[in-house]
Image (spheres, rainbow, N blue to C red):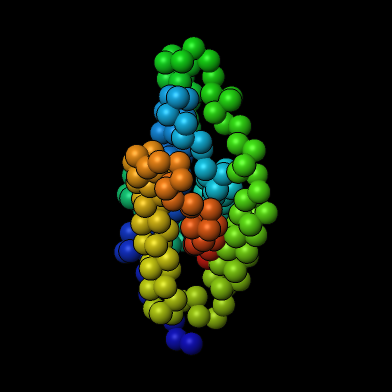
Amino acid sequence: MPDVAVRHPLGLPAGSVRATLALIIAGLFWTLLLIPDEKAIPIPLFLYFLSAMILLFFFAHGKSISAEEGQSPPWGLPHGTFRVIIVLGTIAGCGLHYYLYGHFPIQRLRPQPEQLAQWPWLLVALVGGLALGWLIGRGPWRRSYVFMDLQAWVSLLAMLGLGAEIVIVLFINPSLKTDLKLDLSTWECVLTGIVAFYFGSRS
C-alpha cells in the first residue's frame, strides 16, 4: 500500500481527541461528586471503567506519538496541560466537596449495590473495545485515508455519546418519576466499548 500523509482524527494535533475525552470523563466525575446527596444521582458505574482511559492517556499517550513527526501537543497547548488540568480539577473537586458538605466524597464514590450487576458487561465492553481497537489500529490499512476517517467518526461518536450521557444523567432522568427514568445500562456498555475502541486504535 503506498505511503500517505498521516491525518489525525478531525484534523487536530495528535492526542487532542484523547485529551478531550479524558477531560470529559473526569469532568463528569467532578460534576456528579459535587451534586448534593439528596439529589440521589449515583455516579454511573461505567465511569469507573472509563477512568482507565484517563490513566491510559496519562501514561501511554506520549509513547503513541513519535517525536520525529514534529507534532504539536494536544490542541496546540503546552505539553502536560491536560494532565495538569485533570489532576488539579480532581483535587479541586474533592476540596470543594469537603468545603460544601464537611467530608470527603468517599460515600459518593461507593457504587450502589444495584449497579454491581452491570460490571461484567462493562468489563467485557472495555477489554473488548481496547483489544479490537489495538488490533485494528495495527493492520496494514492503518495509514489509509479510509481508516483515518473511521477513527475520526469513532472519535465523534465517543464525544457525542459522552455529551448525551451528561444531559440524560444530569437533566432528563432527575426530572422523571422513578418508573419512567431511562435505563442507561446497555447504552453505557456500548459507550464504554466505543471510547475504549478509540483509545485502543490510537495507542
Q: Which sits in the foreground, 4 or 103?
A: 103
Question: In the image, 66: left or right of 160?
Answer: right
Q: As drawn, is 167 to the left or to the right of 58?
A: left
Residue 203 locus on image (x, y percent): 54, 60
Q: Position of residue 46 (x, y in %)?
A: 55, 48
Residue 178 in view: yes
Residue plotted at (62% across, 42% down): 114
Image: 89 above or below 195: above
Asked whether residue 148 is in view, the answer is no
Residue 157 location (% of width, % of height): 39, 62
Q: Is residue 19 left or right of residue 111?
A: left
Q: Outermost residue toward the bottom?
A: 1
Q: Foreground residue, 159 or 101?
A: 101
Q: Residue at x 51, y 61 (%)?
A: 190
Residue at 36 percent across and 57 percent down: it is: 160
Q: Residue at x 58, y 25 (%)?
A: 107
Q: Where does residue 82 sit, x and y in percent of width and height?
A: 42, 41
Say which quarter of the image contains residue 31. top left
Task: Count up the numbered dots.
Answer: 0
Q: Is residue 129 above or below residue 38?
A: below
Q: Is residue 136 above or below residue 101?
A: below
The answer to whether 150 is drawn above or below residue 38 in the figure is: below
Residues 67 and 45: in front is: 45
Instruction: Report the front residue among 141 and 153.
Output: 153
